[in-house]
């Protein structure tokens, strides 16, 4: 998960109108030409995981090193500087991957807002970026971690014990308590097998398939069936303790966006709850099903995503969501900057009183097969393919796409790509790559025929 975009507050880039300019097409950019081994990783190390923040993305290499690209005004690239290495419209950035300094032995990564974190061998956690600095620092009291998730101004780690520790800003209850610079245990969470941090809320998947959430609830993102409480945090609805999501059982994966949450169920269907201004819930409408206490359309209870089956992985971004199904990728929600990857930024529909472009139900990402992992950022998305290659699409304000080339299109007056482009990473192609990709294409054709 990522958190609210530093490019444009919670919804739009600075100075942006919500009216949309003409999309200018360009051919898909080609294969990578730059080397991703500047951090001293092993020659030819393949990418094993990816993570996206508001306007940056990071890749975990097989050898435990990490490379990042995109915005760097908060030091979220971890290269030791807040000044570059390049400038994107006057803001520090890197348009191709740079190595995170002083970091090795990473086994998991996460990005959110302007911060990035990594779990290291041995279970400690190190973070860099907003509120931390331009090089990794160990999170105080964090140990025994096996994965981590980063929200806008907070982060949570899943522990080997099945507990969850969180740290950072806690004014909306997203830590399960008050603000805390070091890791603190979330009371009442036991048997957790996954964790997801949203903008101002957090959730844990519990062994057995239930989901617990805590933090802000003004848009029903806790899934309790109401957006009014159960407590108040600064006058806003919240819960400082973990509450169980109503009606969700058999969940196998979770993801948290800005103000909403989604879960994959055991049969491969997906259910979501929370904010729905840009069709984040994928239910065929952005005007309901309820009006929540913070004044926006939402669903405070879980609702099924229309027309999606066979999902095996899911990622939630600022206001868009993507799921892997049979090696292909389907996305829905906000699409004003091409973040759904379907070849357009002009729809296919409009949301929020016809002021933003969106897809109200899942659409297929263009020309992309063999997807093994997906990361959704503020207004961009990246996919890891079988064999270790990475493709990104969507907003390219700060080099978000990582290919080192000028953006091929214009979306609402801002640089973008509405189709996947190759990140500048040289990786060896694993022996089974072509077979996996061919198999994914066959499964997708078979699914379409049915």
Image (cartoon, rainbow, N blue to C red):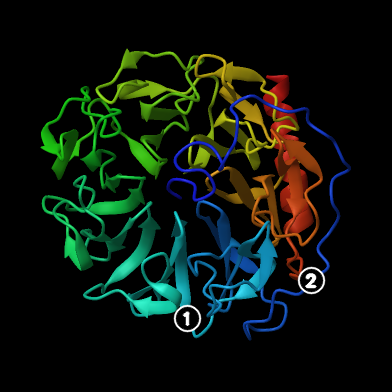
For the question of whether residue 403 can be seen, the reply is yes
Residue ID for mark 1: 105
Q: Dot 2: what SS? A: loop
Q: Dot 1: what SS? A: loop
Q: Residue 99, percent across and down?
A: 60, 77
Q: Residue at x 44, y 62 (%)?
A: 115
Disc 2 packing (10 Å; few <14; some 14–19; many ≥20): some
Circle 2/circle 1 CB separation < 8 Å: no
Screen quadrant of the C terminus: top right
Residue ID for mark 2: 34
Of label 2 and label 1, which has the lower sequence position? 2
Q: Residue 207, percent across and down?
A: 26, 47
Disc 1 packing (10 Å; few <14; some 14–19; many ≥20): some
Q: Residue 440, percent across and down?
A: 70, 42
Judged by depth in the image, the label closer to the viewer, 2 or 1, is 2
In the displayed structure image, the side of residue 19 where residue 254 appears, left or right: left
Q: Residue at x 69, y 33 (%)?
A: 412
Q: Nearer the viewer, residue 24 or 282?
A: 24
Q: Nearer the viewer, residue 50 or 386?
A: 50
């Amino acid at each position: 998960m990522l958190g609210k975009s530093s490019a444009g507050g919670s919804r739009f880039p600075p100075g942006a109108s919500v009216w949309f300019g003409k999309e200018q097409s360009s051919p898909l950019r080609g294969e990578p030409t730059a080397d991703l081994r500047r951090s001293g990783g092993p020659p030819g190390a393949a990418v094993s995981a990816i993570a996206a923040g508001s306007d940056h993305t990071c890749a975990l290499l097989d050898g435990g090193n990490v490379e990042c690209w995109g915005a760097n005004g908060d030091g979220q690239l971890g290269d030791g500087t807040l000044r570059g290495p390049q400038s994107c419209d006057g803001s520090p950035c890197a348009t191709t991957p740079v190595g995170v300094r002083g970091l090795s032995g990473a086994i998991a990564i996460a990005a959110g807002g302007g911060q990035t974190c990594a779990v290291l061998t041995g279970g400690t956690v190190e973070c860099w970026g907003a509120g931390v600095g331009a090089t990794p620092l160990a999170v105080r009291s964090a140990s025994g971690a096996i994965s981590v998730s980063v929200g806008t101004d907070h982060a949570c780690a899943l522990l080997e014990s099945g507990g969850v520790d969180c740290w950072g800003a806690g004014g909306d209850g997203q830590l399960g308590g008050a603000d805390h610079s070091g890791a603190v245990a979330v009371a009442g969470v036991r048997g957790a097998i996954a964790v997801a941090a949203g903008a101002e809320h957090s959730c844990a998947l519990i062994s057995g398939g239930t989901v617990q959430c805590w933090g802000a609830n003004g848009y029903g993102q806790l899934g309790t069936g109401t957006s009014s409480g159960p407590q108040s945090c600064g006058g806003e609805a919240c819960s400082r303790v973990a509450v169980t999501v109503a009606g969700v059982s058999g969940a196998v994966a979770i993801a948290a966006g800005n103000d909403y949450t989604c879960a994959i169920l055991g049969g491969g269907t997906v259910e979501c709850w929370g904010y729905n201004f840009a069709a984040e819930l994928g239910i065929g409408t952005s005007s309901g099903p309820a009006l929540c206490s913070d004044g926006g359309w939402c669903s405070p209870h879980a609702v099924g995503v229309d027309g999606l089956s066979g999902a095996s992985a899911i990622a939630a971004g600022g206001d868009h969501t993507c799921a892997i199904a049979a090696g292909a990728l389907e996305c829905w929600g906000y699409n004003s900057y091409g973040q759904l990857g379907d070849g357009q930024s002009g729809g296919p529909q409009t949301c929020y009183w016809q002021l933003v472009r969106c897809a109200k139900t899942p659409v297929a990402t263009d020309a992309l097969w063999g997807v093994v992992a997906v990361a959704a950022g503020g207004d961009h998305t990246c996919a890891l393919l079988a064999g270790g290659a990475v493709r990104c699409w969507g907003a390219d304000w700060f080099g978000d796409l990582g290919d080192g080339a000028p953006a091929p299109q214009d979306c609402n007056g801002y640089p973008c790509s509405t189709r996947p482009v190759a990140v500048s990473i040289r990786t060896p192609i694993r022996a089974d790559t072509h077979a996996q990709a061919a198999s994914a294409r066959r499964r997708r054709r078979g699914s379409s025929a049915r």
